[in-house]
Image (cartoon, coloured by chain):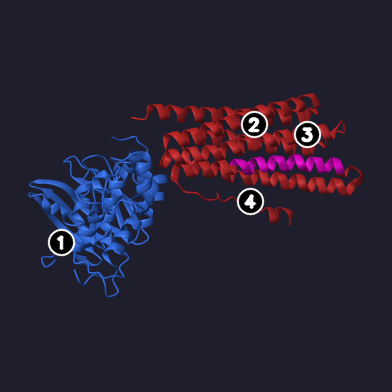
Amino acid sequence: MPRQHFDRHLQSLLDQVLILGSMVDQAMTKAIDALKRQDHAAARRIYEHDLRVNEMRYALEDECITVIATQQPMARDVRFLAAILEIITELERIGDYAKGISKINILLGEVPVEPSILLDLQEMAVLGLGMLKRALDAFIAGDAEGARAIALEDDAVDALYLQVYRKVMALSLADPSGIEHFNHLMWAAHNLERMADRITNICERIVYVATGEMKELDTSDDEMRNHG
Amino acid sequence: MVNTDSNSKFALQATNLNLYYAAFRAVKDVNLSIERQKVTAIIGPSGCGKSTVLRSFNRMNELVPTARIEGEVHFLGQNIYDRQVDPVEVRRRIGMVFQKPNPFTKSIYENVAWGARLNGFKSGLGNPSMDEWVEHCLRKAALWDEVNDKLGQSGLSLSGGQQQRLCIARALAVSPEVILMDEPASALDPIATLKIEELMRELAEEYTIIVVTHNMQQAARVSDFTAFFSMDRDRAGYLVEYGPTNQIFTRPHNKQTEDYVTGRFG
């Protein structure tokens, strides 16, 4: 192994990606928790926390570019670095969704949230964050099969999204004066649905690093059908 | 060398090629097809037979007394090792540029004109004059602008990078179809190296280029196809993997290639 210095650099990048992953995981967990309690102070803290997520993402991007420029990575190494550039972007976006949910929390004000929708949102977050955790494990292990399986779980999140959509429609029809409130809930669900899509993208990168194959992972995701 | 198939997709095709120096088998069982008007890079660790394979492509290996070949090398459809084939004609059509620039101790002009004259270059009757031909070759080698006011000076008065481009101009003067380059930039500084690499890309529009290089980044930068050679326990070189350069450097199929291009080997 004549490239120990380079290998240490790659390992350090991987460690930092995992830290970034854990930061956005925590942000989303706290955002949902704050929404459940309609805790606006906690929601504001998530806003501030997102600045650190963004800073770390840019620092990592900078470090990746430096490694590419100075070490001339090839084959799996270059795929790994290219994947990190994508994955940190996806993680930062997930951080933005946590921020989006915090913003909705504040916009909802003191109006109580329909408990069954709150449960659906929580369930979406639990499923999505489970996917994220296992996707990062698969990234460490270079596990293409695991990544493909995780991407399939997106369907369950989409199903819950559709369920929230139907509830929001029904509630809006029953009480048109609450349309803005219900619309906010729909946006919260949308943020969670997008989070799972981002994790699917991360899974695509894991498959790419492991196999060199760059293609979209098939889920039965069909948003036209869901909204049709 | 008359019955060559000018429509062939491949300029050179090595079939079951084995190369020996006395009893030592230096290269074993190579099957490799080189596409026309492309740059093909041959990479691999020291001693894997890269240069030996390259030299077998224009029968230059025959100049080593103990060298022996088994198998065939087809040039546009014809086996260059067939008995009736003239090795001098092979070397005219498949030229070579070496690691160390080796201009003749003649003027810049004569370095180009000499080979052309020796190979029966005739001016007039629709052909260019010798002056025009020398200019043409020096332009093709991206050297004309730097030497046009001193064509009478010795080729050895030029810088290393210029000397190497002069050698390329000299190779072009006999109208080859293939140019073999054995580490053509390894003795040059980075700027001169980039000039040679640019030149290879330009030449590939008209010629087939095969380049042996130790410099993997160079192979990645200039070539369309890459052949990776390694050697077995008996130190016989063999072809491990051959493919489009972007595939070899981003997703090689073979673990040995992966280890070599990522620098985890050797």
Marks 3 and 2, Cα distance to the nearest angstrom? 17 Å
Callout in the foreground (3, 1): 1
Mark 2 or mark 3, which is nearer the start of the sequence?
Answer: 2
Please identify, in this view, whether the residue under mark 3 or under mark 2 is nearer the observer.
2
Helix, strand or loop at mark 3: helix
Q: Nearer the viewer, residue B140 or B248?
A: B140
Q: Which chain is red?
A: A
State which region is magenta.
A180-199
What is the CA distance from the residue labelled 4 to the residue labelled 3?
27 Å
Amino acid on which the number 4 mark rests in the picture:
Asp
Q: Are marks 3 and 1 on the same chain?
A: no
Chain ID at mark 3: A
Mark 1: amino acid: Val
Residue visible at 44% across and 34% down? A70
Q: Which residue is mark 2?
A: A54
C-beta proximity under 8 Å, tags 2 and 4: no
Q: Quadrant of the N terminus of chain A?
A: top left
Tag 4 and tag 1, C-beta contact below 8 Å: no
To which chain does the residue with label 4 belong?
A
Compared to residue B30, the image places residue B6 above or below, namely below
Extreme-right residue of the structure? A177
Residue A221 tag number? 4
Q: Are marks 1 and 2 in contact (CB under 8 Å)?
A: no
According to the image, label 1 marks what residue? B88
> Between marks 2 and 4, how big is the CA–CA gap?
29 Å
Q: Nearer the viewer, residue B221 or A79?
A: B221
Q: CA separation, marks 3 and 1?
A: 80 Å
Q: CA distance from mark 4 to mark 1?
A: 66 Å
